[in-house]
Image (tube, grey):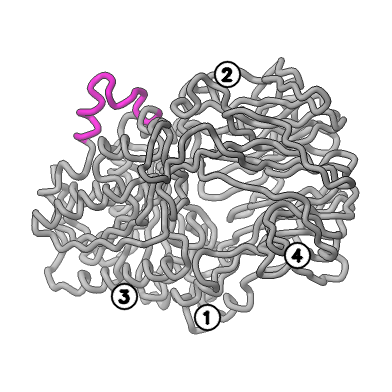
Amino acid sequence: MKTVISVGLVAAAAVAYRAAVPAHALIAQQPVAGFTSADVYKLRSLGDVQLAPDGKRVAYAITRRDGAGRPSSEAWIRDLSTGQEARLGTDATRASGPRWSPDGQSLAFFGKVGDSSGVALAHADGSAIRFVASVGGTNHVLPSMGERVAWSPDGKRLAFVSSTPGPEEDANGDPMVITRYSYKPTASEGLTRFDDNKRLHIFVADLATRQVKQVTTGNYYEHSIQWSPDGKEILFISNHGADPDRVFNYDVFSLNLASGAVRQITNTRNAEYQPVWSPDGRTIAYLGTKRELTSSETTMEDTHVWIMNADGSNRREVGQAIDNRQRAPRWAPDGKSIYTIVQVKGSSFLYRVPVDGSKPTVVIGDQGSVESWALTPSGGVMYGFASPTEPAMLRDRMTDGSTRDIMKLNSALLTQRRIAPVEAVNFKARDGMAVEAYLTMPLNLVPSRKYPMVVEIHGGPHGAQGPAFNDKAQVFATHGFATLMVNYRGSTGYGQKFADAIFGDQDGKEAEDVLSGVDAVLAKYPWVDSTKLGIEGGSYGGQLTDWLITRTNRFKAAVPAAGIANLVSFNYMSYYHDYLAVEFGRYPHEKDLMDTLWARSALRYVNRVKTPVMFVHGENDNDVPIAEAEQFYVALQDVGVPTIMVRYPREGHGVRETKHVVDVMDRSLAWYDRWFSQPKGRADVKPVP
């Protein structure tokens, strides 16, 4: 399951509340109105921050949620000296992925110009848009893709990734003929049932002659491209294994543009991602793993920053000193260090990692989430940031460590809303392991009163909830609910040992961690009503919700979203079939694992369930197929448990259309209200054996 699945704007959600300022003092300064589900339509998010080479302009993407269907993207350009902003194109253009030319005079981007969709160019101020070449995509599963477009160093050519038909028969025909092992589309796909069988290849456009040439061919997928500093090669990622559909194994390759020859730079059993040349072209940095089996969907092993010589020799892990998950590397201009975003507990920090092996340093370590970023000519950092109170900020971190807020996209809305405080809760699991959780308080909290609490479980399982604004938790707070988010063992941001602690033990001790978190909150906060507890989660959080209601009857209502109820059926119906092999160390048909999977499936224990359940699922979920909800739904009906199933059309794994996001929030609140109001006294907290 995906590392982060949420029906809200931000999957990670928790705020390490500043103890220096009393909560009642902040509340007194805030407006009366809390955040509601209707406000979700007004929220905007920020991403893809791209600073011009001279540092005078910044391009960025804004995601809006006030239109029909799924959120839409816009690309904008801001003059940093005047503050003037210009949109790149119009609603019809749907511009995305802006990238500056080496001289900063032009922007390449993806969008629509007239009746043509593909890659286009504009002047630095967003004017004079002209179409360059058509670009096609694919719904094939290609996790952790990097750059799709790259400028040549002299600015005369553009390389980009586009699709061509594959050799297979159309799987969407009549009849539907399936020949591939990997025949279902990626998780977010909500409209089609089968892989389109297209392949991604690299194309190069000459901007003067407007001639476009396909420079790679075959039955593989090439992506994550970057032009070499000398202009002679293009770096890319591909899987050239004997059976790439069955065995996920990205390697690093390079294309010689003059000869057309492709050289394989790495040939490992582990995976490499998102390679980038050093400024002098002698070294390549990339994300990598070390274990021989990596899932195409999620991975237990943290990715770390590695470097190697341009010929693939002398590979070394420069990110080893940071025992946490690292993201795409980027070189410092002098080539002496690499920058990477690192997950630290529930936050995302920006680190500088020296290539000589000396100690890494934290460049940005604020509580929240550093998103897309760019180095400034002066040595600072311009970056997108999700803070506890604002999910979309553009900030400038100076070389002296001071920070300037350039803009807050949602200030007009959120200054008129009260934001509920959140506190970190640290506790010991039943076996003594230290675990962290975050508790979002209900608004207008009066300690002498009692308030319901909903346990919101993150997906993955290798993900985490952290200190970034969370729309759903805020909606629940306005409704008078507390929300508890437990970063159970297996979560990322707490070191490799903690992430590995779930190995071979799904629906085991990590489920107990969630219950221990509930106990810790009840012991610390007497205002939480132990008779009005709800539980929910998405993806792996849905799986744990399914599982926990077979273990205990303490929850009055449950809302599992896109959860696995039967690990055996899931393994063979999902678009990927290597996830459980990574999680358990062997495939289901090996060494009696099938029996273990059934023993850890909630469906097996359906006769124990007493908690009313509302299932939430995307109609075309190829990650966790909707049959998982269907099985458990029918079984609960047979047992006599109050149950409903809400199916969302045009949705894959996770709900994305804004009206569906809002509907899930509203239906969940109504479901909890219905069952919290049932006068049955104190809930039974004794776990089912």
Give me the disc on residue 28.
Answer: 1
Marks 3 and 4, Cα distance to the nearest angstrom?
A: 54 Å
- Which picture quadrant has residue 212? top right
In this rendering, is residue 453 above or below 252? below
| Towards the viewer: 507 or 620 | 620
Marks 3 and 2, Cα distance to the nearest angstrom?
A: 60 Å
Identity of the residue furthest to the bottom in this view = 32
- For label 4, the residue is 88
In this rendering, is residue 581 above or below 88? above
Q: Are marks 4 and 2 in contact (CB under 8 Å)?
A: no
Confirm whether residue 245 shows in the render. Answer: yes
- Which picture quadrant has residue 154? top right
- First-in-chain label (4 vs 1): 1
Q: Label 4 is placed on what type of residue?
A: Leu
Q: Label 1 is placed on what type of residue?
A: Ala
Q: Are marks 2 and 1 in contact (CB under 8 Å)?
A: no
- For label 3, the residue is 448
